[in-house]
Amino acid sequence: MPDLDSENLSLDFAVIRNLRKQAGLTLQQVSDQSGLSVASLSKLERNQNLIELPTLHRLARVFGLSASDLLSLAESATAHRKKVTRYQSGPFNFEKLAFQGVELFHATARAGDSLQHPEAHGDEHEICWVRKGRVHIAFSHEQHTLAAGDALKFDAVLPHTYEIQADAELIIAHLTKTHRF
């Protein structure tokens, strides 16, 4: 079971101070609108206090956010560093970086190379940005030829093939779709 003590949680509620200042609100005004004391808000902004879900909900509403949006902001306030992973898939050479909700690929391939159903996809959007060369992307219902500087966004669950028409360098992004119910 993961260690969930408060020292290992990576939530930074200093984001509340940023939101408050962007909205031009004082601690007292946020206190009045949320029902939290000024002292509690001040401690929370300095990460010296924990917050319960109902309180998070009331505080988020002050800024026109959902509780999950405010929690996401507090979660993502910390920078995350990663190293690139290099690999080959078919004739394509890839460098990959993956963060929550997004995977980025730098791909190179030679004229005549092709890759069908590249990488297994979940429920994602895919963006292909051609940096150099020319690439033909084929779907069952349509086809697109992209030159340097062109980009294409599509639903990654659709079967697709990358056909390299001129030595190419691509940036490909997989963006997790967000579902709200």
Image (spheres, grey):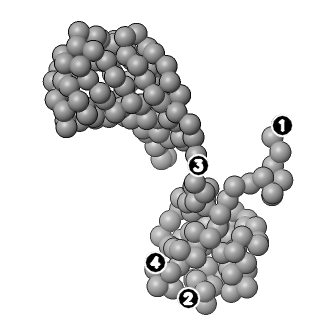
Q: Are marks 2 and 4 in contact (CB under 8 Å)?
A: no
Give the mark nearer the N terminus: 4 vs 3: 4
Viewer-nearest residue: 88 or 101: 88
Viewer-nearest residue: 33 or 44: 44
Q: Nearer the viewer, mark 4 or mark 3?
A: 3
Q: Residue 30, how many percent across, how many down?
A: 58, 83
Q: Nearer the viewer, mark 3 or mark 2?
A: 3
* Residue at the spot 83% in from the left edge and 45% down from the top edge: 3
Instruction: Quickly name the residue at label 3.
Output: 80
Number of residues whose C-alpha sits closer than 10 Å to that of mark 4, classed few (under 14), some (14–19) or many (20 or more):
few
Left or right of 144 on screen, residue 107: right
Check disc 4 and give the amino acid type. Gln
Instruction: Quickly name the residue at label 2.
Output: 26
Image quadrant in which the N terminus is located: top right
Residue 22 tag number: 4
Instruction: Quickly name the residue at label 1.
Output: 1
Q: Are marks 1 and 4 in contact (CB under 8 Å)?
A: no
Cα–Cα gap, marks 3 and 2: 31 Å
Cα–Cα gap, marks 1 and 4: 39 Å
Give the mark nearer the N terminus: 3 vs 2: 2
Cα–Cα gap, marks 3 and 1: 23 Å
* Residue at the spot 65% in from the left edge and 63% down from the top edge: 12
Q: Residue 181, how many percent across, how many down?
A: 49, 46
Check disc 2 and give the amino acid type. Thr
Q: Are marks 3 and 1 in contact (CB under 8 Å)?
A: no
* Residue at the spot 49% in from the left edge and 19% down from the top edge: 87
Q: Residue 118, how many percent across, how many down?
A: 39, 17
Above/below status of 14 relative to 140:
below
